[in-house]
Amino acid sequence: MSKQRYKLSDRQLRALTINERPALDANGKTVIEANPDPKPYRFVDDTQGAPTGFGVYVGTSGNSFEVRKRVGERVVRVSLGSVDDMSIVQAHEKARLEIAYIVQSGGESPRRRDAQERRTTSAKHITVRACMERYIERLDAQVEAGK
């Protein structure tokens, strides 16, 4: 993320595209100007209540909120969701929760936690019979592969 910080409203965030970007005018107020290099970019949010590391990614297919947190040598960046789906206040709250998890877990990505929860939930609904059938299929595949 760039080091420059900008204050944008929800309406301005939803309207941003890669063809325009925020900038500061002579008075230090955030304005939207043409982007000379229309590529995806990131910037840090400076609205009141924004957690450290909170920013916005402006991409070709849409804009999303994200948060970055350094834990030791690692930097964990987590996408929080689309700018179209949540307000900036909701994104700030979600960012705080994700930062707390990253710090508590020692730098683990919340996405890894979510994937583990999905696997656990999926495994809870399998029967012993279905599990044994999968195991036998796996053994048959190994025999066919010559292992």
Image: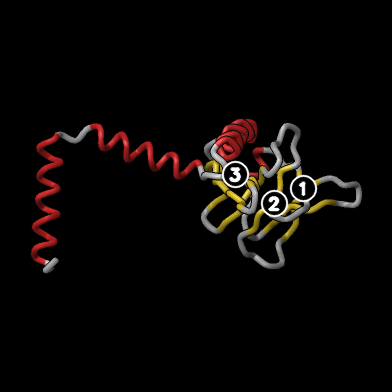
The alpha-carbon separation of the residues under discs 2 and 3 comes to 10 Å
In the image, taking residue 16 as reference, residue 78 lies left or right, namely: left
Label located before the other in sequence (1 or 3): 1
Label located before the other in sequence (2 or 3): 2
- Residue 125 against residue 110 in the figure, above or below: above
Q: Which residue is painted at 54% across and 51% down in the image? A: 62
Label located before the other in sequence (2 or 1): 1
Quadrant where the N terminus sits is bottom right
> 59 and 78: which one is in front?
78
Q: Mark 2 highlights which residue?
A: 43
> 75 and 93: which one is in front?
75
Q: Mark 3 highlights which residue?
A: 65
The alpha-carbon separation of the residues under discs 2 and 1 comes to 7 Å
CB atoms of marks 2 and 3 within 8 Å = no
Q: Which residue is painted at 14% across and 47% down in the image? A: 134
Q: Position of residue 53 (x, y in %)?
A: 68, 44
Q: Mark 1 highlights which residue?
A: 5
Three-letter code for the amino acid on which mark 2 is drawn: Phe
Three-letter code for the amino acid on which mark 1 is drawn: Arg
Determine which quarter of the picture holds residue 115. top left
* Disc 2 secondary structure class: strand
Q: Position of residue 26 (x, y in %)?
A: 91, 52
> 115 and 145: which one is in front?
145
Determine which quarter of the picture holds residue 54. top right
Q: Which residue is painted at 61% across and 31% down in the image? A: 93
Scheme by which the image is coloured: secondary structure
* Disc 3 secondary structure class: strand
CB atoms of marks 2 and 1 within 8 Å = yes
In the image, taking residue 15 as reference, residue 79 lies left or right, namely: left
Three-letter code for the amino acid on which mark 3 is drawn: Phe
